[in-house]
Amino acid sequence: MNPMMAARAYAAAQGTAAPSAPGGNVAPAGGSEFSNILQSVIGDTVQQSRAAESQMSAAVQGRAELIDVVTAVTSAEASLETVMAVRDQVISAYQEIMRMPI
């Protein structure tokens, strides 16, 4: 997940205008945009986890360097922590909405 995707996801969650991309395009803030970003980030997380697993397997077989394994695992861990942080924020927002009087 790159910083621009994180900024867009945050802007969509806050209901504000999303920051412009380097090309000058402004992404619309909305639920479908946020869900697309979430799906993309979760897909990237799964892909990075699989890459880390394949690096570990290659290291066990003697075909990969330890630094490559550590880099892949660290990248997968950072991606998973980002997804978990977004999940925690969504749960917190849901709980806050449920506490609001009708």
Image (tube, rainbow, N blue to C red):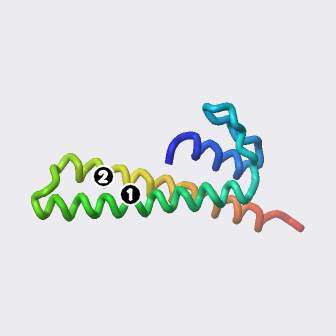
Please, what is the three-letter code of the amino acid marked with disc 1? Gln
Q: How many marks?
A: 2
Q: Residues within 10 Å of mark 1 (few under 14, many from 20)?
A: many
Nearest the eye: 63 or 10: 63
Spatial distance from mark 2 to mark 1, Cα to Cα? Answer: 7 Å
Vertically, is 19 above or below 53?
A: above
Query: Residue shown at 69%/45% (left/top)?
Result: 11
Residue 86's spot in the image, x, y percent?
A: 57, 56
Q: Which SS class for mark 2?
A: helix
Query: Residue shown at 55%/58% (left/top)?
Result: 40
Vertically, is 58 above or below 67?
A: below
Query: Residue shown at 58%/46% (left/top)?
Result: 5
Residue 89's spot in the image, x, y percent?
A: 62, 56
Pointer 2 or 1: first along the chain: 1
Q: Which residue is mark 1?
A: 48
Q: Quadrant of residue 92?
A: bottom right
Q: Which SS class for mark 1?
A: helix
Q: Quadrant of the C terminus?
A: bottom right
Specify the farthest residue to the left: 62
Q: Which residue is mark 2?
A: 72
Specify the farthest residue to the right: 102
Nearest the eye: 7 or 48: 48
Task: Determine contact: label 2, label 1, CB under 8 Å.
Answer: yes
Residue 65's spot in the image, x, y percent?
A: 15, 50
Query: Residue shown at 23%/49% (left/top)?
Result: 68
Vertically, is 97 above or below 10?
A: below
Q: Residues within 10 Å of mark 2 (few under 14, many from 20)?
A: many
Please, what is the three-letter code of the amino acid marked with disc 2? Ala
Vertically, is 101 above or below 44?
A: below
Tag shown at residue 31: none
